[in-house]
Structures are given as structure tokens and as C-alpha cells.
Amino acid sequence: MSSDVEALASSVRMDVEDGVLMVTLDRPKANAIDVATSHELYAAFNRLQEDPTLRVAVLTGAGDRFFSAGWDLKAAAAGESIEADHGPGGFAGLTRLFGLRKPVIAAVNGLAFGGGFELALAADLIVAAEHAEFALTEVTLGMVPGSGGVLRLPRKLPSAVATEMLLTGRRMTAVEGHQWGLVNRVVASSELLDVAMRLARDICSSAPLAVAAVKEISEATMSLGIEEAYRHSMDSSSYRTLLSSEDAKEGPRAFVEKRAPRWQGR
């Protein structure tokens, strides 16, 4: 991958290509996350939100063993509290970043444990290397997966499966995660970023206002009944903006003219 390589301190790298923001967590040896790293990750996701030239982010970890081991327990042992100010996006910069209208793809390159799994769960899609594994290990350490894990996992997996993972900390392989619908793709480690980038480009080929509307409606109606959700979706700000947009006219026009649409995001 080429172009516009940047670094935030020493823990987060960013690379931009064709409207895709590649975010790499790089904290040897386990890509663990402390307060400073949470702020750095938030800065990356905030850039995604604010930069109109960016459409989607791909998030991964450096190396091939850990996506992220989660909360930096060495920092915790030194006195850093999990309740410390991790910034506007919460732990890992994403777990409480509600209202992000651009998708994030987690390219899980290895072990995603504890807060690292919670970070992946906060993404919209997961592509995993064949050797990747997932676990919420907090209960084995006397804690609770309070950065969204206890809330998001039961929405992603069947109740019995999620409950077992939450209560025992057991590991789930990438293949099993794919079987349950948690993981979108399982690929060879050497193909991980290429597959994640292809998925990102597929999203980039869609209308940006439509993508934003899908995210807003999905998030806002997840816990509602169909009738109430239907009413809510028709009134959502993103949907109303989409209906009167130039892009809503461009899509049908491009289809009739048998050409690729030229999205303007307005």
C-alpha cells in the first residue's frame, strides 16, 4: 500500500488510499491499549468522520500474533484505571463513538482478546485471518467486559453462545466465528489486508449518503419492533437528506445510461 503515510505518536499508523483510511495499531508485543492509545485511535476515527474524501476505515494490528490483547494490564498495574478518560470515543477510540456514519472494517490479524475483541465488535464488519481467535477474558481477571462486549456480543451471536463466552472467557476461532455470523470473511493471513481493502472498495462504490443512512437507521432501530422501526427509519435525518440528494437522482440515471454512477455525496 502506498501514499500519505502518517504516524500518531508511536502507537497508531495511518495510510490513505482511494478513499480508504488504513489504521494500524502498533504497540509491541501485544498491541495492548492504554489511555494514550485510546486517544490516538479516536483521532484516527475522528479523521475518518470529518474528512469528506474518506469513505471507510480498515483497522488492523501490527504483526501476525495479536490484533490486540485489549487493556494494557501493565498500565493498569501501574495505577491506570479502566475508568480513566479514554477520550470521546471511549476505550480504544471506537467503542463509544456513536454516530459515526462511515463504516469501519476490522481486519483481525491474530488474537483479539478482552478490549481488543470489544474494539473489533465496535467495527461494522470483521475480516479475520485463519489463525485469529476471539475471547472476552475479563471474568477470568475479576472484571467485566464493560467497553461494549457484554452489550454487543449477544447482538452478534446466539444467546447461548454469547453467554458462554462472557461467563467463561473461552476462545472462539475465526472459523467458528464465521459459522455463527460474527465474522464476514476468513482468509489466509497473507491475504487479510487485500481482502479487507476489496471489501472497503466495494463500500466506496456505493453512494456515501446511502451508506450513512443505512448505518444510522440500523443503529437507531436495532432494539425496536418492525412497525416502530419502520416509522423511525422514514423520519431519520440521513434518510431524509438522501431522498432529496443529487446522488438519489444519479443512481437511477447511471443505471439507465449503463455507466458507473458518479457520486457527489450531496
Image (cartoon, grey):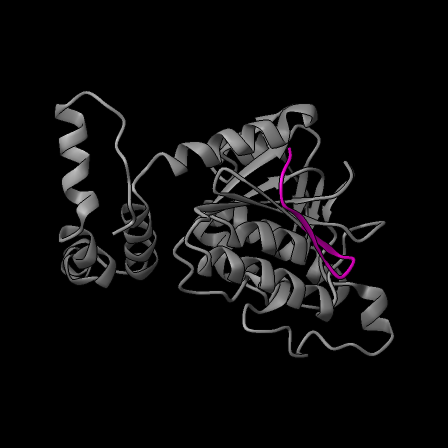
Left or right placement of residue 142 versus residue 96 in this view: right
Q: Up-down: is 48 above or below 127?
A: below
Please state which of residues 34 and 10 is positioned toward the viewer in this rendering.
10
Within the image, what quadrant is residue 58 found in? top right
Left or right placement of residue 42 versus residue 212 in this view: right
Q: Position of residue 82 (x, y in %)?
A: 69, 74
Instruction: Write the residue at 71% across / 70% down.
Output: 35
Magenta highlight range: 1-13
Instruction: Write the residue at 60% across / 39% down.
Output: 107
Left or right placement of residue 226 versus residue 102 in this view: left
Q: Up-down: is 171 above or below 243?
A: above
Q: Is residue 93 visible?
A: yes
Residue 6 sits inside the magenta stretch: yes
Within the image, what quadrant is residue 10 found in? bottom right
Within the image, what quadrant is residue 9 found in? bottom right
Q: Position of residue 225 (x, y in %)?
A: 21, 57
Count of marks placed on residues = 0
Please state which of residues 59 and 246 is positioned toward the viewer in this rendering.
246
Q: Up-down: is 215 above or below 262?
A: below
Residue 85 sits inside the magenta stretch: no
Query: The N terminus appears in which quarter of the rendering?
Result: top right
Left or right placement of residue 67 versus residue 235 in this view: right
Q: Position of residue 18 (x, y in %)?
A: 49, 37
